[in-house]
Image (cartoon, rainbow, N blue to C red):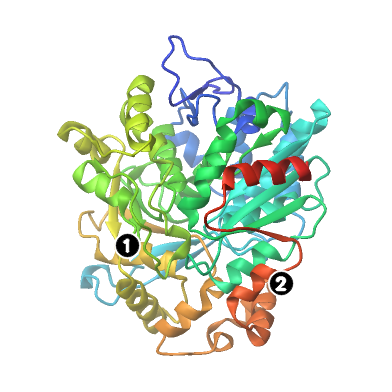
């Protein structure tokens, strides 16, 4: 194994040699100064035997092993890293001791030869305080930042855009932190399909001392525009110590590799010929990028399947080689994936091009530049997505989402959320992998209580949430809050009037307004 602590580069740095950054620098920067995304230029190389030695490790222990490979021990010692992880996972914020639980799910339509074993395994990544997988990386990232800032006697202000879950997770991550504050932009329910539960979790702490919340009259792609403009103003970014904890922050992507290593070790046998196929609910593409990195680090991965809803820009890229310019966002039952500009595609293209940073810069100038133009991969590049990056894709409609939620419940007495359903539908339909030595693992990124209307309707009409939430889940504080919210909820739009929530209206200059608000808050 080799250390990669000082080997982070911008995906768009076409200088030779490129500027190198430590993980600590990358964490505090978020975006690279040239507008690119920071990525490791080389990765730790793990043998199968080294990975097998982790079998039996807890989730927290696997986190420590992965992060230790990227962290400079002279900056954050191994003991301090352990303390950060203890703070993230041992304070009762997760409702199960193991942090991540694996659920076996059967599919009655699968071949008879596989009837004695589960059709797939669902990795429940949502046991944290906001019932979303973002908690797994966000709590560690915020603790890591706090430790770095303590050593530097500094402060940092986080700017976050959310399509549903990231904002609440970031807010939860900074509560109680002395050196961090956060400003969250979220899309109004009038212009997106963000759920009542997601909006409630975002606004409930809007009056906290180190939190600001902005409701935007637009969708998640719309709110990305002023955020990128602010981060591109390097003088403003430096003056107000701004950074991002969206999946643009490479730390989040590194932490998500743990999801793959841990779930693999729970369900794949140590037999040499076995591997895993991961089905990943996909919006911005950060989770898929992490899967590719895990495979390149040595994890036996058959493939990573990017599972999207009707906002299928990434699926179109993978299946046809065409990266389309901005489309209209389609509101779906899986709102956290209602994204037409999956910005982590830049990381995927960086890996596809074998770190050809000049080429990535050219691609991004074409795709994200003024007017936005389509990017066409060569046939060799398109094939390489599957053959070299092991990346495949699948798209599922709202009808498919509802049918999958109902099917899983009818056959397993198990409830999944709409985003997980997108991935389960892909796994059920996937006939491209051998059944004998490839284990199917679905990344379950959110608890179904966060999407109660969609789930209840899928289960046969307006079935009350209280009837399909398990007694164990009802003990989770966030689930209890949602049950109470549903019992007293009025129109969803009333939540944007919650004390402390700021508003960006259509027709206003959001970049100027955001800068003004940040300046006044900080």
Q: CB atoms at circles 1 and 2 under 8 Å apart? A: no
Marks 1/2: CA distance? 32 Å
Residue that protrudes farthest toward the front in the picture: 507
Q: Secondary structure at mark 1?
A: loop
Q: Secondary structure at mark 2?
A: helix
- Chain-order first, disc 1 or disc 2: 1
Find residue 477 and name its label: 2
Query: Residue at coordinates 51% horizontally, 46% vertically from top-left?
Result: 224
Q: Which of the pair 357/186 is nearer the observer?
A: 186
Foreground label between 1 and 2:
1
Q: Would you place residue 67 above or below residue 509 in this image?
A: above
Q: Would you place residue 115 above or below residue 357 in this image?
A: below
Q: Classify 10 Å Cα crowding around label 1: few (below 14), some (14-19), many (20 and above).
A: many
Q: Which of the pair 342/495 is nearer the observer?
A: 495
Q: Which of the pair 17/475 is nearer the observer?
A: 17
Q: Classify 10 Å Cα crowding around label 2: few (below 14), some (14-19), many (20 and above).
A: some
Find residue 310 and name its label: 1
Query: Residue at coordinates 29% horizontally, 60% vertically from top-left?
Result: 395
Q: Is residue 16 left or right of residue 479?
A: left
Query: Residue at coordinates 46% horizontally, 42% vertically from top-left?
Result: 290
Find residue 190 and name its label: none
Pinpoint residue 435: horizontal percent, then vertical percent: 25, 58
Pinpoint residue 260: horizontal percent, then vertical percent: 47, 47
Q: Which of the pair 50/500 is nearer the observer?
A: 500
Pinpoint residue 271: horizontal percent, then vertical percent: 36, 46
Q: Does residue 66 show up?
A: no
Pinpoint residue 371: horizontal percent, then vertical percent: 34, 39
Q: Would you place residue 414 above or below residue 228 in this image?
A: below
Q: Is residue 210 left or right of residue 58?
A: right
């Amino acid at each position: 194994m080799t250390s990669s602590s000082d080997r982070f580069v911008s995906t768009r740095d076409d200088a030779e040699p490129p500027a190198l950054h430590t993980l600590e620098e990358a964490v505090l920067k978020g975006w690279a100064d040239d507008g690119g995304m920071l990525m490791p230029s080389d990765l730790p190389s793990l043998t199968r035997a080294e990975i097998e030695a982790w079998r039996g490790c807890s989730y927290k222990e696997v986190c420590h092993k992965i992060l230790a490979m990227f962290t400079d021990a002279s900056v954050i010692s191994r003991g301090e890293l352990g303390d950060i992880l203890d703070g993230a996972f041992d304070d009762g914020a997760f409702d199960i001791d193991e942090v991540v639980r694996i659920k076996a799910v059967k599919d009655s339509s699968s071949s008879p030869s596989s009837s004695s074993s589960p059709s797939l395994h669902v990795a429940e990544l949502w046991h944290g305080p906001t019932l979303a997988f973002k908690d797994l990386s966000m709590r560690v990232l915020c603790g890591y930042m706090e430790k770095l800032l303590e050593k530097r006697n500094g402060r940092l202000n986080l700017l976050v855009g959310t399509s549903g879950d990231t904002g609440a997770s970031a807010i939860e991550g900074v509560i109680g932190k002395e050196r961090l504050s956060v400003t969250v932009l979220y899309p109004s329910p009038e212009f997106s399909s963000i759920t009542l539960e997601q909006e409630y979790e975002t606004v409930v702490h809007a009056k906290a001392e180190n939190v600001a919340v902005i409701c935007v009259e637009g969708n998640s792609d719309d709110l990305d525009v002023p955020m990128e403009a602010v981060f591109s103003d390097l003088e403003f970014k430096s003056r107000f110590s701004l950074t991002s904890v969206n999946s643009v922050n490479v730390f989040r992507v590194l932490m998500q590799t743990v999801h793959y290593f841990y779930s693999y070790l729970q369900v794949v046998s140590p037999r040499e010929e076995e591997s895993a196929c991961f089905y990943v609910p996909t919006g911005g593409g950060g989770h898929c990028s992490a899967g590719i990195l895990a495979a390149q680090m040595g994890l036996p991965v058959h493939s990573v399947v990017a599972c999207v809803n009707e906002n299928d820009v990434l699926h179109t890229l993978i299946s046809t080689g065409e990266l389309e310019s901005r489309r209209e966002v389609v509101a779906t039952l899986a709102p956290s994936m209602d994204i037409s500009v999956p910005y982590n595609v830049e990381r995927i293209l960086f890996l596809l091009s074998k770190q050809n940073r000049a080429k990535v810069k050219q691609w991004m100038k074409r795709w994200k530049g003024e007017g936005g133009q389509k990017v066409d991969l060569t046939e060799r590049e398109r094939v390489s997505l599957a053959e070299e990056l092991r990346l495949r894709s699948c798209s599922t409609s709202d009808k498919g989402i509802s049918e999958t939620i109902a099917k899983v419940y009818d056959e397993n007495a198990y409830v999944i959320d709409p985003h997980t359903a997108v991935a389960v539908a892909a796994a059920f339909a996937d006939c491209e992998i051998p059944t004998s030595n490839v284990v199917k693992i679905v990344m379950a990124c959110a608890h179904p209580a966060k999407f109660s209307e969609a789930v209840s309707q899928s289960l046969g009409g307006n079935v009350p949430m209280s009837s399909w939430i398990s007694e164990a889940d009802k003990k989770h504080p966030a689930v209890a809050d949602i049950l109470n919210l549903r019992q007293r909820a009025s129109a969803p739009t009333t939540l944007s009037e919650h004390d402390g929530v700021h508003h960006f209206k259509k027709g206003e200059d959001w970049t100027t307004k955001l800068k003004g608000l940040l300046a006044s808050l900080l």
